[in-house]
Image (spheres, rainbow, N blue to C red):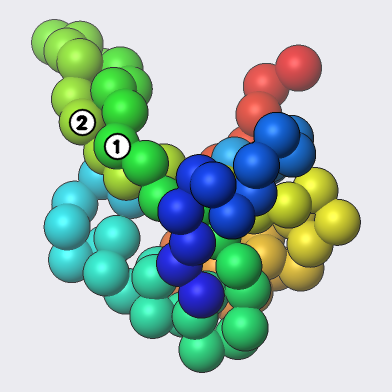
Amino acid sequence: MRQSGEFFSEQELALVFIAKKLKEALRAESELTSAGFDYLVETDTYHGGLIFQSQRVGAFFYVLPAVENAARELLSSRGFRPYNPVC
């Protein structure tokens, strides 16, 4: 279920997905809610484009680290490409 930042208070959250379009964000919200995950959605900027790079706005989905892998697996099984941090 979508939660506010206050719900998670000072807890560290893991970024699991960046939706680039509203339709994609609404679908991701529906999948995470149906599966019973508590998550936070915030808008932020990301860099997009291969030849002509630009800053774009997307919906960033965060969950608690304890359920990060399960949330990634769910999103992946539903056709999303979960965020993959490059270390």
Would residue 76 be visible to someone looking at this image? no
Q: Secondary structure at mark 1?
A: strand
Q: Residue at x 41, y 50 (%)?
A: 41
Q: Residues within 10 Å of mark 1 (few under 14, many from 20)?
A: few
Counting residues from the start of the chain, the first of labels 2 and 1 encountered is: 1
| Residue that label 1 marks | 43
Foreground pick, 75 / 62 = 62
Q: Position of residue 39 (x, y in %)?
A: 55, 60
Relative side of 87 to 36, left or right: right
Q: Residue at x 17, y 57 (%)?
A: 22
Q: Amino acid at mark 2?
A: Val
In the picture of the structure, the residue carrying the numbered disc 2 is: 57
Residue 37: in sight, yes or no? yes
Say whether marks 2 and 1 touch (CB < 8 Å): yes
Identify whether 25 is placed above or below 32: above
The residue sitting at the right extreme is 66
Q: Quadrant of the C terminus?
A: top right
Please give left or right for residue 3 compared with residue 8 in the image.
left
| Location of residue 66 by image quarter | bottom right
Amino acid type, residue under disc 1 in the picture: Thr
> What percent of the width, then of the height, locates residue 71?
67, 65
The mark closer to the camera, 2 or 1, is 1
- Looking at the rendered structure, the secondary structure element under dot 2 is strand
Please state the horizontal and vertical placement of residue 84, each as a whole percent of the image.
Answer: 63, 37
Q: CA distance from mark 2 to mark 1?
A: 7 Å
CA neighbours of label 2 inside 10 A, class few (<14), some (14 to 19), many (20+): some
Decide which of 29, 50 is in the foreground and name it. Answer: 29
At x 38%, y 80%, the residue is 30
> Where residue 60 sits in the image (x, y, percent)?
41, 42
